[in-house]
Amino acid sequence: MYAEERRRQIASLTAVEGRVNVTELSERFNVTAETIRRDLAVLDKDGVVHRVHGGAVASQSFQTAEFTLDARSRSASNAKSAIATAALEFLPAGGGSIFLDAGTTINALADLIGSSPIAPHLSIVSNSLPIALSLASNGVPDVQLLGGTVRAITQAVVGDTALRTMALMRADVAFIGTNALTLDHGLSTADSQEAAIKSAFVNHAHKVVVLCDSTKLGTDYLVSFASLDDIDVVITDNDAPETILQQIRDRDIDVVVAKR
């Protein structure tokens, strides 16, 4: 496991549980206590957690930092692959229309859709350059890439042009990625323009399926783009804390745990 991925999981556990200790984290991740202390020091410096004697407690600050696509694709890659496979079950039966949000987990889903027998029967709209290219490379016949401004760090199309186009569209299912998920702040991300597109996807779909690996549960980013009341399904991996999964189920949201 990369250090970056381990730290994201530690941040998520701290946010969910409120407090973590070095010994338990060392056993969970099968690394030395000194490695965990270094991880906590990095997270404390970034403002993600607060170091205390023997461990760390959750920070109440909202995150704003974004990682490159390459860094995000390496993080929790096995979990993202399992989540994407589980998401195939929510494609419209017999074909229909879907929105594919920008993000590395959604990109993994797009790769699977491209080789699926249902692909020729789907009408797909996305704001992601990598996703549109993946689908087109696999010969998917009905793919629309929203027009607008491209954000370099995420290769996502954003802006007024994309939003005006979205105002005219509806889909059977929206597959949405998120930087973070909490009960109070809902789904959140770092950039307001990407948040606006994500919100449009959510509001213009009959069913909303969120693909969210366990490292993102219990953390908050600056801009909330949907509440839990807006979503129907959350697909995560088997490292997700049962505490937060049950809290999500209590909101009448279907939770699918994909095994890596």
Image (spheres, helix red, strand yellow):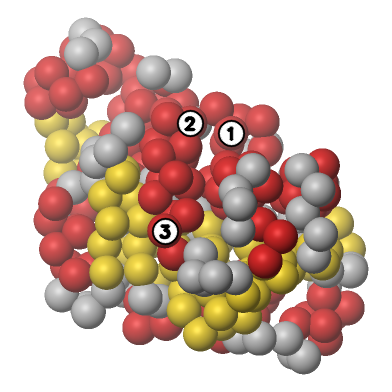
Is residue 247 among the parts visible in the rendering? yes
Name the element at disc 2: helix
User: Which residue position is annotated with label 3?
Assistant: 89
Name the element at disc 3: helix
The answer to which image quadrant residue 41 occupies is: top left
Q: Earlier in the sequence, mark 1 or mark 3?
A: 1
Residue 48 image offset from top left, x and y in percent = 39, 44
The residue lying at 22 percent from left, 79 percent from top is: 252
**Left or right: 120 in relation to 257:** right
User: Which residue position is annotated with label 2?
Assistant: 77
Q: Quadrant for the N terminus, please.
A: top left
The residue lying at 42 percent from left, 58 percent from top is: 89
Q: Quadrant for the C terminus, please.
A: top left
Q: Are marks 2 and 1 in contact (CB under 8 Å)?
A: yes
User: Which residue position is annotated with label 1?
Assistant: 73
Name the element at disc 1: helix
**Left or right: 28 in relation to 35:** left
